[in-house]
Image (cartoon, helix red, strand yellow):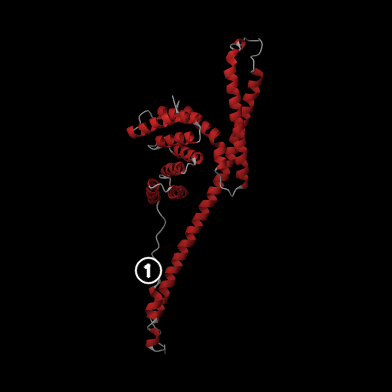
Amino acid sequence: MQHGLLCWRGGRVALLLAGVALGGMTPGAARAQAESREGIYLQNQILQLRQEMELMRRAAPVAPPVAAPSRGGAPVAGGELIGPLLDRVSALEDEVRRQRGLAEQAEFRNRTLQQQLEKLQGDVEYRFNQIEGRGGAAPAGRAGGGQPGALTPSTTAAPATPAVPAAPAGQPSAPGPRTPEVALREGQAALGRRDFAASEAAAREVLAARAPTRAQDAGILLGDSLMGKRDFQNAALAYDDAYRRSRASGRAPEAMLGLANAFNGFGAKRESCQTLDDLRTQFPRLPASLADRVGQARQRAGCR
């Protein structure tokens, strides 16, 4: 039953956030932008079809013959429209899934290029620091150890000896890159002081480092940072990705709660309540503090 709930929930998130995921792509990929616009258009069509079907269901009880059609009898009023509408919804959902797959491929390529660029930048900075360090040490050796055959007076060489190596002598100790633990700690501190840009940068740094033991923590930190910036749609993607990284971990309920709050943030109250229902089903025994937060989220979303 849990596997079925996970599959259902994954499909709902994929359907609802297909356009969102496409909309959050890197601006450098023109193809991803085109797919984003098409995904949003398909999502709007699905929502419009759902509204039409809901109106037809509400209007169905008004006509008594609609209640229970007999086998081989006259077709139900509106039945001629419901069938094609369902076919259109199914076709649009398939197209959304295809578009989301293409978007994820483009996003993966962009993420890989970004990681390669960051690694190249780090290598360049490291080599530059090494060159600076060697450049500061070389003049000291040349100035301190005078050549035995030099004919110049010592009074002319003395002023140059302390002046050249003194400036770069304290520079070679450049700090190395942050470890994932340090980046997460500093990112949480930035989140506490509402510096959402710094906390988001720290979370993305950990995710780019591909530290498997810290990836879920970084995903939740990224979602919290985007929620602080009121970027609810990308926050939902971050929380959902963090949940999928480890569905049985101690922070999985926190990721689901963040996803429900992100849904509620951009008006998807029904999906928010369904996510909170899944959270209660999969994790019936929550800590008191987290259970209180779940109750508050249900009240904000108006869940029954």
- Residues 63 and 154: in front is 63
Residue 262 location in percent, x, y?
Answer: 47, 36
- Count the marks: how many? 1
Is residue 87 among what the camera can see? yes
Any part of residue 248 in sight: no
Rendering coords of residue 279 (x, y %) = 42, 30
Identify the residue at horizontal 56%, vertical 36% (top origin).
Answer: 18
Quadrant for the C terminus, please.
Answer: top left
> Mark 1 sits on what residue?
170
Q: Residue at x 40, y 28 (%)?
A: 280
User: The residue tagged with tag 1: helix, strand or loop?
Assistant: helix
Q: Residues within 10 Å of mark 1 (few under 14, many from 20)?
A: few
284 in relation to 222, above or below:
above
Identity of the residue furthest to the left in this view: 288
Determine whether 125 is above or below 139 in the image.
above
Horizontal relation, residue 87 to residue 209: left or right: right
Relative horizontal placement of residue 67, taking residue 228 as reference (left or right): right
Across and down, in percent, residue 241 comes to 48, 39
Looking at the rendering, in which quadrant would you find the N terminus?
top left
The relative height of residue 201 versus residue 269 in the rendered view (above or below) is below
Measured as percent of width and height from the top left, residue 254 is found at 40, 36
- Looking at the rendering, which quadrant does residue 63 occupy? top right
The residue lying toward the viewer, choosing from 74 and 62, is 62
Amino acid type, callout 1: Gly
